[in-house]
Amino acid sequence: MMPGPRTLDLLSLPLRAVETVFAPDSTGFSTSRFVRWYDEKYGTERSGRDWVKAHAICGVKTNIVTAVEVLGRDTNDCPQFKPLVEATAKNFEIEDVTADKGYVSRENLELVDGMGGTAFIPFKSNNVAGEAGTVWERMFHYYNSRRDEFLKRYHARSNIESTFAMLKAKFGDSVRSKTDVAMKNETLCKFLCHNIVVVHQSVVELG
């Protein structure tokens, strides 16, 4: 069985009474390794630094990270929604989950609905209403008929971008380790350190 996302229990639980709205996304950390790939668009071989990809979910009020998974650079975002949300739900009550349209799927909408919450994920231009009475149809019509209200709640997802910016500003946007396991652990340490900072800041700001 493959291990799931790391839940940052000890460092996020102090804020479980504060956080009920969450936002997932991914970000990359460059490594010291170089890779080559073939650019089909320009028909030439290119090279550049390799990177690891961190999939994380945070509370939008304090920027506390509740779960994180570090995977390869080509890992898709959408399949990581479920494990991140489920890991968060073990310790937090979930009211809303806000994510960009890369996460839109029937399974993801139904997952949050089954937890008693609402997933605010914009629909793509080629999406249709689908089967009547489903969560997908309800949110599709909500998105199209009450767009301003939908987007007002959706824009809470910008806090995950702020979380990544905070983390990289303090602890760097690259890893120095050489092996895959060491690079993953170094990236996870950045998130642990970020959460220590957030808890301390929240103690000061929220009392």
Image: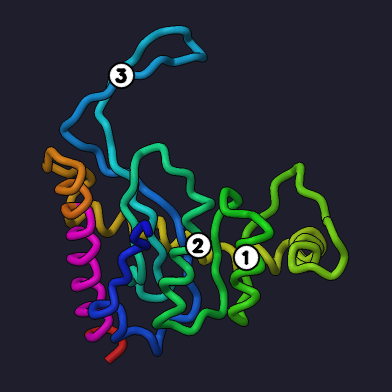
- Is label 1 or label 2 in front? 1
**Residues at badges 3 and 1 in contact (C-beta under 8 Å)?**
no
Q: Nearer the viewer, residue 102 or 18?
A: 102
Residue assigned mark 3:
36
- If the image is split into quadrants, where does the N terminus sit? bottom left
Amino acid type shown at disc 2:
Arg
Looking at the rendering, the stretch of residues picked out in magenta corresponds to 187-203
What is the x, y in percent for residue 149?
A: 70, 69
Residue 31 within the magenta-colored segment of the rendering:
no
Tell whether 123 sits left or right of 192: right
Q: Main secondary structure of the magenta part?
A: helix
**Residues at badges 1 and 2 in contact (C-beta under 8 Å)?**
yes
Q: Which mark is residue 157?
A: 2
Helix, strand or loop status at disc 2: helix
Q: Nearer the viewer, residue 19 or 133?
A: 133
Say which label, 2 or 3, has the lower sequence index.
3
Residue assigned mark 1:
120
- Depicted 174 relative to depicted 104: above or below: above
What is the x, y in percent for residue 7?
A: 32, 71
- Depicted 115 relative to depicted 120: above or below: below
Helix, strand or loop status at disc 1: strand
x 27%, y 23%: residue: 35
Mark 1, Cα crowd under 10 Å, few <14 / some 14-19 / many 20+, is many
- Depicted 80 relative to depicted 202: above or below: above
x 57%, y 53%: residue: 103
What is the x, y in percent for residue 83?
A: 46, 64
